[in-house]
Amino acid sequence: MTKEMWNVDTVHSTIGFTVRYMMISNVKGTFNDFDGTIEADPEDLTDASIEFKIDASSVDTRMGGRDDHLRSDDFFDAENHPNITFTATDIKQKLKDRYDMTGDFTIRGTTKPVTFDITFEGVAKDPMSGDEAAGFTGTTKINRKDFGLTWNAALETGGVVVGEDIKINIEIQLRK
């Protein structure tokens, strides 16, 4: 294949996260509004141009009060920093279908390099639309404090309410 423009099919894609909560469990969440463009040969991402933009206010943990707190100045400060962005800067192939994708990840106005472990899931023709689609999954882990997300509260039993490490999971379907 040759390098072509692809768009994220947001209906068939998910950007999610997991964080330790109260030292005893994990809370999962997603972002409902995001977009991305990829100029690539999906079977060889090494020279791809990849950009993602996530609407920080679209955070959804299935609990309205917590989501409002995440949108506030204590966390994403979505009013002043409406977007979370990722722009790939270096992509290295590890195996035929696996890549280390490093890029500039920006949350709350702070940009740091982050590397995703990406798996190419394949290409297929959608039987309903006839469109060519490509699938990818990826994971990474960040320390939220590196991006200015420092709010926390102590628990009377010891420890804190919110863990520092955030696991990010993406499941992306692209359409040509």
Image: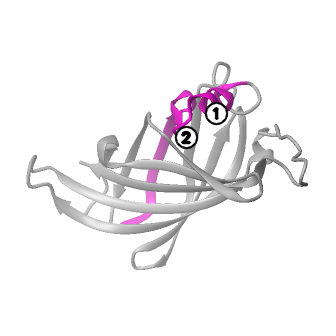
User: Crowding at label 2, few (<14), some or many (≥20) Cα neighbours within 10 Å?
Assistant: some
Front-lying residue, 89 or 176 = 176
Label 1, secondary structure: give it.
helix
Q: Is residue 110 above or below residue 141?
A: above
Q: Is residue 41 above or below residue 161?
A: below
Marks 1 and 2: in contact by CB < 8 Å?
Answer: yes
Looking at the image, is mark 2 or mark 1 earlier in the sequence? 2
Alpha carbon of mark 2 to alpha carbon of mark 1: how far? 7 Å
Location of residue 101 (image quadrant): bottom right
Residue shown at 91% from the left, 47% from the top = 156
Front-lying residue, 85 or 128 = 128
The answer to whether residue 63 is magenta is yes
Residue shown at 48% from the left, 48% from the top = 15
Q: Is residue 145 left or right of residue 10?
A: right
Q: Magenta span covers which residues?
A: 44-72
What x and y, as percent, mark residue 103? Answer: 60, 52
Residue shown at 75% from the left, 25% from the top = 73
Residue 61 marker = 2
Q: Is residue 57 left or right of residue 153?
A: left
User: Crowding at label 1, few (<14), some or many (≥20) Cα neighbours within 10 Å?
Assistant: few
